[in-house]
Amino acid sequence: MSDTNLKRVIIEPVTRVEGHGKVSILLDEQNQVKQARLHIVEFRGFERFIQGRPYWEVPVLVQRLCGICPVSHHLAAAKAMDLIVGADQLTPTAEKIRRLMHYGQMFQSHALHFFHLCSPDLLFGFDADPAIRNVIGVAAKFPDLAVQGVMMRKYGQEIIKATAGKKIHGTGAIPGGVNKNLSIEERDALLKDIDQMVEWSRGAVKIAKDYTMDNIEDVKPFGSFDSSHLSLIREDGAMDLYHGNLRAIDKDGNKIFDQVDYQKYTDYLAEEVRDWSYMKFPFIKSIGPENGWYRVGPLSRVNTCDFIDTPEAEAERKEFMALTDDKPNNITLAYHWTRMIEVLHSIEKIKELLNDSDLQGTDLVVTGERREEAVGLIEAPRGTLFHHYKVNKNDQVEMANLIVSTTNNNEPMNRAVQKVAQDHLSGVEITEGLLNRIEVAIRAYDPCLSCATHALGKMPLSVSLYDHDGNVIDKKFKQ
Amino acid sequence: MAEQTITFTIDGVEVKGKAGQTIMQAADEAGVYIPRLCAFKDLTPHGSCRVCVVLVNGRPQASCTQPATEGMVVESETEEIQKHRRNIIDMLFVEGNHFCMFCEKSGNCELQAQAYRLGICAPKYPYQFPVRDLDASHPDIFIDHNRCILCGRCVQASRDLDGKTVFEFVNRGTEKKIAVNAEAKLADTDIDISDKACDVCPVGAIIKKHIGFATPVGRRLYDTEPIGSDIEKKN
Ligand code: SF4
Ligand code: NI
């Protein structure tokens, strides 16, 4: 059946997703949901903008891509440029400073997402009055939680400042290493609050876990679907947010590929262009564009790893996996729980690192034999982030290809929206309840629409409903 | 014969200088900083950027070229002069492509430092976004014309300090730009990384390759003290 026979509903403004989203829901002749699509306008101007720039500028320059996750871009680009300058192995100090920066970013990003953007949904329910279902409402009813969220975010930002020089648009990672170590004073300032942060992180895991378990019957089907999962993985199978090889598993946990050197990612992954979306759809080549899509991010990372190498997060992982009998968990709302497991893991890692005297080392940069092409991957808060560059013999960038986390989750977000629309659309009207649920489903993925679209600023969501003739029969906005 | 001392005032403060000194030289020695962009120690001043303009007995003069004379009354930090300086800096910002956020000269850049010293947060003129090229042909040195403010330091340094003529100005007006003597590319010249010409650029236009961002934020030249503080400390 051609699309012209279908009705279409569009949902705009997802209020608390940073960026801009437009949802269209297409009905069939019986007014059942035929298809739902999330449109994110991806602007590819950046890859052109970067052309000709010198390679050592790139880790700083790419932070312009996104005001929300600049540190992830900074580190992914730096990892690619390490290889360009022939630094195959960083010094222990450089590697650990970079990791500290990364865990700091993970901690602050996840804390912001959970406390600021998601906790209103979990604490008040999806149908609560939008006037209270927001961060101000949380602050009024749960003042301690609101304060924790702010303080955890601030702590992560202080780590970024100590390692990158600035809270935003720092310069810490340079090709082949870092430009500073962590002074004793900086270390002690961070150690002062570490136990409080660990404590609050445990509490955050508990909130997400209790929410899931208390509402398991509603949570399980909500926007959920089976999928493959992709992430970096350490050589021993441990979760590793900073470095590793690629592992992809199917919905049952069978390995599609494992320990793949990401320099060769194009042998395993490709990006499909669809005429209705500017944002590409990555897929696993061996499976093909139709079914080769996969999820990334906290849920996928907890699903793909064999274990977590910090004790408290590992205990939480086991409890989480027990829910699905150690098989991959494909529940969309489980992203929240796994995100908080990663918060706990990150803070455990931060504590470990702060107590490591390598951070005061002075051996910061290495170089080796120059290369012309390299790929840098990192597990950004929202999922696997790919930076791929070619640099010419004059040291200028000749080619850049980026696959951001949100692009990796493009198909899954579409599926989540479609599932919610199918389950919750009644009649030919976009109700407040449907609008809220679509927003909640998208938000579970924590999409960075800002960086997927390569544009700064906060943009809202719109939803439109189309009938089978392609006429808009309803349209609602969320600011 | 002992050097003749002259006495004059800058903004009402008495300054003693030596006969033959420019206003800027005497002011520098006396610990009074006059903002500047083209003037550079070791190079002959040529008064082209106009940032160092002061009022001498009520008339505007470039302090880097104007000789100091006995009894002259110099005004430098008046509201009007500061406004004039801000205007020049503003125009330089919008005339090129100065993206401090990812420029490796940030924190060490004299244009940026003057803007901070003069209290400029964002330029008030519209950005021109000119289309300019890069010359990355040389293995050690890189020219980014996007950031050139045409101060002429590199031209002078190459000629007067290095005994070469690597750089020159070509074209006029808005088309004016720095060129290399070889017509072609920087790689075809006899420039060397140890040349003085590589150390004088006030902005990020002439760059030594591979070392960008090696100095962390906080330890760069103007991170902790405004430009001119070294001179003012003599006071
Ligand atoms: S390249 Fe630098 S030193 Fe040369 S004229 Fe331009 S700004 Fe001045
Ligand atoms: Ni982003």
Image (cartoon, rainbow, N blue to C red):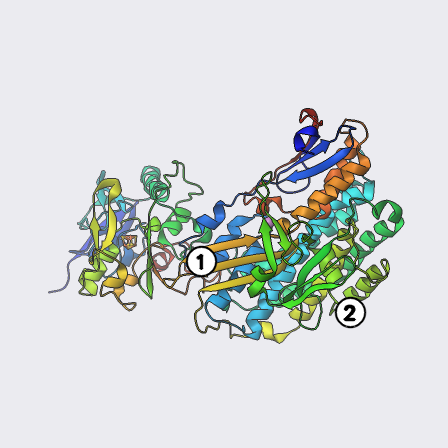
Q: Furthest residue to the front? A: A1
- Quarter of the image for residue B201 reads bottom left
Q: How many marks?
A: 2
The amino acid beneath tag 2 is: Pro
For disc 1, the marked residue is: A57
Relative to A178, say whether A111 is above or below: above
Residue named by callout 2: A311
| Same chain for the residues under marks 2 and 1 in the image | yes
What is the secondary structure assignment of the residue under circle 1?
helix
> Chain ID for label 2?
A
State the image quarter where residue A152 is shown: bottom right
**Chain of the residue where label 1 is placed in the rendered structure:** A
Q: Residue at x 76, y 34 (%)?
A: A33
Q: Tell me if mark 1 has few (under 14), some (14-19) or many (20+) residues whose alpha carbon lies within 10 angstroms of its own.
A: many
Query: What type is the residue that disc 1 sits on?
Result: Glu
Quadrant housing the N terminus of chain A: top right
